[in-house]
Amino acid sequence: MIYHTNSFVGYMLWLRYGFLKLRPFTSLKEIYSKYLESPGTKAYTVAEAQKLFAQFDTVMIDTVLTHGDLLSSEAGQRHRGYLLSVAKFFSPRFIIKKFFSKHGLFMLINAIK
């Protein structure tokens, strides 16, 4: 598993630490590096993951929605607050699951050499 750049977790972090901090041009890569876990955390697009595994004969990549993408559990202390409570209340979980299932934080990779 590696982190998927184009996830709802990333979008929400960008809203909080990019858009609302008046830094709308902050990249998702920078957002992940500074705010997801520990400093320097990396996330990859599907295309970047395919390049990482280019030497394998078979590569299967799937993205998975997490509790973080769906706001269905507690967030880390660093991300708690009023905005998160509001977002959790209004989160369109059904719509995300139905139409945006490929925007999950976890990218699962099975590779055969």
Image: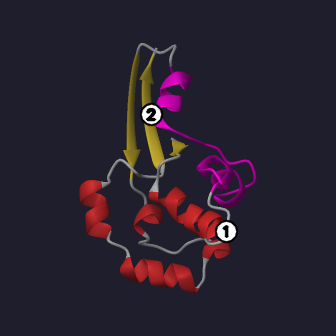
All told, the count of numbered labels is 2
The residue at the point 64 percent across, 44 percent down is: 42
Q: Position of residue 24 (x, y in %)?
A: 62, 60
- Label 1 or label 2, whichever comes before in sequence order: 1
- Taking the view exactly as shown, the residue that stands out farthest to the bottom is 82
Q: Residues within 10 Å of mark 1 (few under 14, many from 20)?
A: few
Relative height, residue 34 to residue 49 (above, below): below
- In-front residue for pair 36/10: 10
Badge 2 element:
strand
Residue 93 occupies quadrant: bottom left
Span colored in magenta: 25-53
* 60 in relation to 99, above or below: above
- Count neighbours of disc 2 (C-alpha within 10 A) and say few if under 14, some if 14 to 19, many if 20 or more: some
Left or right, 82 with respect to 107, comes to right
For image coordinates 40% across by 44% down, the residue present is 63
As shown in the figure, which amino acid type bears the numbered disc 1?
Leu
Q: Residue at position x 48%, y 26% from top?
A: 50
The residue labelled by disc 2 is 109
Question: x and y percent of residue 56 in the render?
Answer: 47, 15
Q: Say which residue label 1 marks.
A: 22
The percent coordinates of residue 53 (x first, y second) are 51, 22
* Residue 31 included in the magenta stretch of the image: yes
Q: Which secondary structure, mark 1?
A: loop
Residue 18 sits in which quadrant?
A: bottom right
> Is residue 44 shown above or below 48?
below
